[in-house]
Image (spheres, helix red, strand yellow):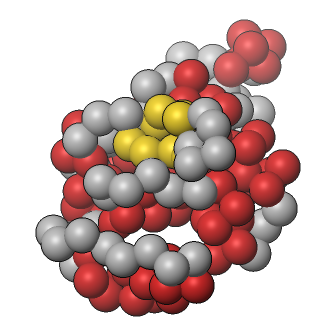
Amino acid sequence: MRLSKQTNYAVRTLVYCAVHAPELSRVADIAKVFGISDMFLFKIIFPITKNGFLETVRGRRGGIRLARPPEDINLLDVMRFTEDGFELSECFGHERETCPFRDRCAYTRALDRALEAFFSVLSEYTIADLVSNPHMLESALGIDALEKGRGLVRQGY
């Protein structure tokens, strides 16, 4: 199984916003840090905003920020809104009905258990867990450099 780019950038965007909090984050800055286009990032932001993980502030000094505390944003929830599905093989979903082994297949049961374990582990982590060292991440993301370039000074934590 491989997670989509949308999921990876959605999680990265949430991490960026958590590290940059309480300030608003600029989409252009996030896109630049991750080496993606603004338009691609807007496509990613839409479902996570629609589902209550981010909020947008319009206007000249607008941007995005977390819509709830980082400890309330679960990784599994984010992935459920950004991935199309989690079918590990054709044995899942509507094609399962056409399988002659349906409900009697050890392979399908093994894949079901593996997916349940994957979900269980992801449900243990939040965005707060991913930003446990905000100063290191702030440096890695270049947040200070971006703000200094715009003449901004960060407030204390």
Report the quarter where the N terminus lies: bottom right
Q: From the viewer's perspective, is 105 left or right of 70?
A: right
Report the quarter where the C terminus lies: bottom left
Above or below, 71 relative to 157? above
Q: Quadrant of residue 154?
A: bottom left
Look at 84% across and 49% down and name the residue there. 39
Look at 78% across and 67% down and name the residue there. 36
Q: Name the spot of residue 5 as percent of width and height, x first.
A: 71, 57
Look at 61% across and 34% down and name the residue there. 58
Pick the residue in front: 148 or 125: 148
Residue 7 visible in the current orientation: no
Residue 148 visible in the current orientation: yes
* Residue farthest along the left direction in this orientation: 157
Q: From the viewer's perspective, is 61 left or right of 109?
A: right
Q: How many marks?
A: 0
Look at 65% across and 55% down and name the residue there. 27
Q: Quadrant of residue 87?
A: top right
Q: Name the spot of residue 50 as percent of width and height, x first.
A: 56, 22
Q: From the viewer's perspective, is 100 left or right of 119?
A: right
Above or below, 76 relative to 39? above
Pick the residue in front: 84 or 155: 155
Pick the residue in front: 86 or 53: 53
Q: Name the spot of residue 46 as percent of width and height, x first.
A: 66, 32
* Residue farthest along the front direction in this orientation: 151
Q: From the viewer's perspective, is 102 left or right of 121?
A: right
